[in-house]
Image (cartoon, helix red, strand yellow):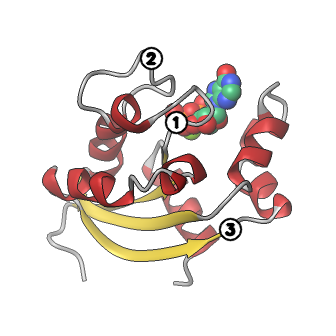
Amino acid sequence: MTDSPSAERTLCIIKPDAIAHQFMEAINESIEAVGLRIVERKELTLTLEQAQAFYAVHKERPFYESLCRFMTSGPICVQLLEGKDAVRAYRKLMGDTNPEKAADNTLRKRFGHSIEANAVHGSDSPENATQEIAFFFAP
Ligand code: IDP
Ligand code: MG
């Protein structure tokens, strides 16, 4: 079900801050405008155990506990994106982790509030995308 042999998949999460501010529709318009397709979507609220597992790679970082609490603070929308060079294309659309440093027109510049409440998550490599997609979606 891929567009072309070069189609790639990545995981997008619309974080609790962006859902609470009703930014989902505007975010998804921007995702589709750069040529990515939303092929699966799931709304849920993470348990603390799920958030800790999803962000386990960061467990030694000083922001880990706060990040996990934030990610459980309200509903999120988890989406599977597909398209050419999807991982890199979507990272570029998201912008820098810190909304203050993110380029104009990026999602984090437009919709992020702080380095923690930065509106969206995106996988950082095709390998991690495969793992993160499997975390939320059955094969
Ligand atoms: P990324 O989301 O741009 O890939 P990561 O370094 O993987 O950035 O961090 C994961 C998430 O942890 C960020 O999106 C953000 O929500 C949060 N985070 C990252 N750095 C900080 C920080 O210095 N303070 C608070 N939260 C942070
Ligand atoms: Mg990351």
Left or right placement of residue 82 versus residue 138 in this view: left
Q: Residue at x 16, y 72 (%)?
A: 3
Which label number is shown at residue 100?
2
Where's residue 35, x and y in %? 15, 56
Q: On the rendered structure, is 46 left or right of 31?
A: right
Is 55 on the left-hand or right-hand side of 98? right
| Mark 1 residue type | Asn
Discs 1, 2 touching: Cβ within 8 Å? no
- Determine the residue positioned at 46% across, 34% down: 112
Task: State which image quarter holds ligand 1.
Answer: top right
Disc 1 element: loop
Using the image, determine if residue 13 lies above or below residue 39: above
Q: Earlier in the sequence, mark 2 or mark 3?
A: 3
Of residue 139 and residue 116, the one placed in the foreground of this image is: 116
The single residue placed furthest to the top in the displayed view is 101
Q: Is residue 32 above or below residue 3?
A: above
Residue holding disc 1: 118
Q: Give the structural element (helix, strand or loop) at label 2.
A: loop
- Residue at image x 30%, y 21%? 103
Q: Are marks 1 and 3 in contact (CB under 8 Å)?
A: no
The amino acid type, in three-letter code, at marker 3 is Thr
